Amino acid sequence: MKNLEELIKSADTLKTLEEARIEIFGKKGILAAEFVKMKSVPNEEKKAFAQNLNIQKTKLTELFEQRKETLEESALEALMQKSAIDVTLFNGVNESGALHPVMETMNKIIDYFVSMNFSIQEGPMVEDDFHNFEALNLPKHHPARDMQDTFYMNDGTVLRTHTSPVQIRTMMQSKPPIRMISPGTVFRRDFDLTHTPMFHQVEGLVVDDADKVSFAHLKFILEDFLHYMFGDVEVRFRPSFFPFTEPSTEVDISCIFCKGSGCRVCSKTGWLEVLGSGMVDPNVFKAVGYENVSGYAFGLGVERFAMLLHEIPDLRSLFEGDMRLLEQFR
């Protein structure tokens, strides 16, 4: 018995312990051989002999389990020590990703108008002539229909040149009051420092009874929006022309780079053009079947805002996937 206990206690690895288990408890092991001897033990002694063997087997089994648990804990501890990582060795740059500057700017714009109770509306990127041009008071001879500006399909449809068709679809599907923005991708045949064939717009539309919407409302919302985007800047409205609004205005902010004193970015004028706006032309309301209503609309290029916010000189760099640029927005 003592020799068997020492055999278990002396096992210093799980492998040697397993060898001891086979030697003691196996089918051809020491205990099995002892139980075979019962055949030659006198009947009156068999009970005591069997009880003694079972007691020894129980003690040896308990001792084996204890030793096994100890060796398993030691093996686990050794493995953990071997695979331990010194976290102080890793203090490099965090390689987490970030939103693209255009999407980041788009989200910031959307957040403002959602907070002002504007809904978000979407529409198809491939449009028909009515929604993209005619309903927006763009006659057949208007320059915006020129092949140099618009991507025409063989079936007469076009890649939308603005998100204004979403406004038309929304007005034709619902009744005033309407308070919406239509963010999305648009397409034009142009490519230079400040233009790309594909870019993003956010256009807004508010329509209600004729006595509930005025130019003063448009002026307030745009001034508040531009202060939200660019901080403490001056805002001015200049008369302009858009087929779908009358009166129409272009909106400028004081140059955020030179603070209005004049620099290369603002062409020495002290002002930067940022968006167009105006009161919705009556012909647009006529095209969608609206009567006795008033409304205002506005539109802006998201890339233009991203360039100004992040001082990016070339619009095309936003679409080139250059990691040296994109890593700056991590």
Image (cartoon, rainbow, N blue to C red):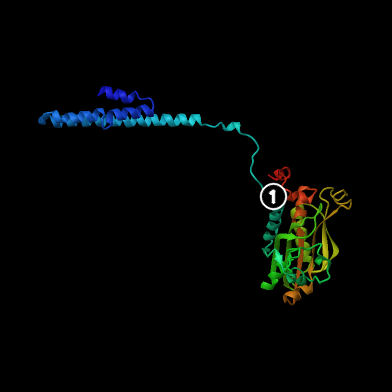
Q: Residue furthest front?
A: 154
User: Which residue: 83% across, 64% down?
Assistant: 249
Where is residue 28? Give x, y as percent: 26, 30
Where is residue 148? Give x, y as percent: 82, 62
Position of the C terminus, as image quadrant, is top right
Q: Residues within 10 Å of mark 1 (few under 14, many from 20)?
A: some
User: Which residue: 73% across, 42% down?
Assistant: 324
Position of the N terminus, as image quadrant, is top left
The reply, left or right, for residue 60 in relation to residue 311 is: left
Q: Quadrant of residue 151?
A: bottom right
The reply, left or right, for residue 277 in relation to residue 123 is: right
User: Which residue: 45% across, 30% down?
Assistant: 77
Q: Which residue is mark 1?
A: 100
Count of numbered tags: 1
User: Which residue: 59% across, 31% down?
Assistant: 88
Q: Quadrant of residue 62?
A: top left
Q: Quadrant of residue 190?
A: bottom right
Q: Nearer the viewer, residue 13 or 281?
A: 13
Q: Secondary structure at mark 1?
A: loop
Answer yes or no: is residue 210 visible: no
Instruction: Name above or below for residue 168 compared with residue 233.
Output: below
